[in-house]
């Protein structure tokens, strides 16, 4: 039977698309300050999956929302206070229902609010890297080279190909970034849905780090297995729910496994913590227990030993 003309060719509508599942969990405040769902793109498949996940794990949507909010906060911090001029958003996901809530808009507000009036700098370049064809089509509506917003077709689980694209390694022309840029790589939940072991996911992360310039930052989230026995049992339920009721995959990582992913970097305070606790914008308001199932970390790639000063002479 031929599919209806309005359905994209080659897309399996019986499979939950992770980007669209994120969209199904989105919320926003209306003019009265009331929090309401603000689903823009999610299909029925993803909306039903979101309902099943929430029924199995109360507040499951908070896990996904805390990840996006962390990425907003860390990106705003890096461009305002660490001099980052190139932000690579790997596995970028779908645009927000409100353009003001997209990551590049958050970055622009942070730049405007923290600009030194005696020293003007060019706005940071924001590069959305995405491989899913449906998500990529929506992201391309955000591209604006004049405003420093780019969208590239690249798979974050293939670091070599992704960074070759960003550096434009196959051409003599300059790429979107260079070794001289102050770069931040945002890996929001990407490694959680790597289909291999956590050791294999760690190797992918290390491959990303190997291509980053010296002094670059890595901000990442990963579904997390808490150490507390009661929380760990609930976390396993959430992991099972993702596999059988959601996108079909998704793995939680322990503290040690996340440390393995960022091995060789300098982990910046507050370390590896639940995403919703990473320098929140305001007081925490009774987050659900599942909020502890997503960890966030900000790390920096150190420079070579040649950049360090000589130790002081001692007799």
Image (spheres, rainbow, N blue to C red):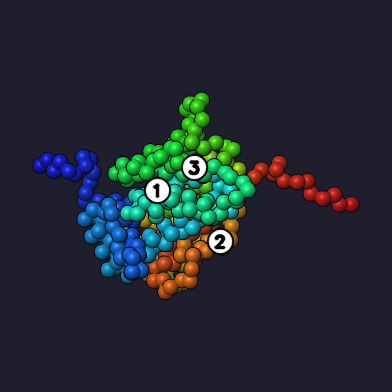
Q: Position of residue 195 (x, y in %)?
A: 37, 50
Q: Is residue 300 visible?
A: no
Closer-to-camera residue (96/225): 96
- Name the residue tied to disc 3: 125
Q: Position of residue 200 (x, y in %)?
A: 45, 48
Number of numbered labels in the structure image = 3
Q: Position of residue 160 (x, y in %)?
A: 47, 37
**Separation of disc 1 and disc 3 at Cα?**
15 Å
Quadrant including the N terminus: top left
- The answer to whether mark 3 and mark 2 are in CB contact below 8 A is no
Closer-to-camera residue (274/246): 274
Closer-to-camera residue (310/180): 180
Residue 21 lies left or right of residue 73; in this view the side is: left
Which of discs 3 and 2 lies nearer the camera? The answer is 3
User: Between disc 3 and disc 2, whose residue precedes?
Assistant: 3
Which of discs 2 and 1 lies nearer the camera? The answer is 1
Q: What residue lies at 58% left-to-right and 53% top-to-bottom?
A: 81
Q: Position of residue 287 (x, y in %)?
A: 41, 71
**Separation of disc 3 and disc 2 at Cα?**
26 Å
Asked if 219 appears above or below 254 in the picture, the reply is above
Q: What residue lies at 51% left-to-right and 30% top-to-bottom?
A: 174
Closer-to-camera residue (143/299): 143
Q: Which mark is residue 10?
A: none
Which of discs 1 and 3 lies nearer the camera? The answer is 3
Q: Is residue 117 visible?
A: yes
- Name the residue tied to disc 2: 271
- Name the residue tied to disc 1: 92
Badge 2 crowding class, 10 Å Cα cut-off, few under 14, some 14 to 19, many 20 or more, is some
């Amino acid at each position: 039977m031929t599919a209806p003309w309005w359905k994209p060719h080659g897309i399996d509508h019986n499979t939950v698309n992770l980007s669209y599942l994120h969209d199904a969990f989105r919320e926003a405040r209306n003019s009265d300050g009331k929090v309401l769902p603000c689903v823009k793109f999610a299909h029925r498949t993803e909306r039903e999956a979101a309902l099943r996940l929430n029924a199995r794990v109360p507040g499951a949507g908070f896990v996904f929302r805390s990840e996006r909010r962390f990425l907003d906060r860390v990106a705003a911090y890096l461009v305002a206070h660490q001099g980052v001029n190139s932000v690579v958003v790997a596995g970028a996901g779908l645009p927000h229902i409100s353009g003001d809530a997209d990551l590049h808009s958050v970055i622009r507000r942070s730049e405007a609010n923290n600009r030194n009036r005696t020293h003007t700098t060019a706005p940071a370049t924001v590069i959305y890297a995405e491989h899913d064809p449906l998500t990529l089509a929506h992201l391309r509506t955000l591209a604006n080279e004049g405003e420093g917003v780019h969208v590239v077709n690249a798979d974050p689980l293939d670091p070599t190909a992704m960074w070759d694209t960003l550096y434009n390694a196959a051409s003599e022309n300059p790429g979107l970034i260079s070794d001289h840029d102050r770069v931040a790589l945002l890996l929001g939940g990407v490694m959680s849905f790597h289909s291999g072991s956590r050791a294999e996911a760690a190797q992918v992360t290390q491959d990303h780090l190997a291509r980053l310039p010296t002094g670059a930052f890595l901000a990442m989230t990963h579904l997390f297995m808490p150490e507390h026995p009661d929380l760990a049992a609930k976390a396993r339920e959430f992991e099972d729910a993702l596999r059988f009721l959601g996108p079909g995959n998704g793995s939680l990582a322990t503290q040690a496994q996340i440390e393995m992913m960022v091995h060789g970097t300098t982990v910046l305070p507050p370390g590896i913590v639940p995403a919703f606790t990473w320098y929140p914008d305001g007081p925490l308001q009774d987050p659900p227990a599942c909020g502890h199932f997503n960890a966030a970390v900000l790390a920096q790639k150190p420079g070579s030993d040649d950049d360090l000063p000589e130790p002081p002479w001692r007799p």
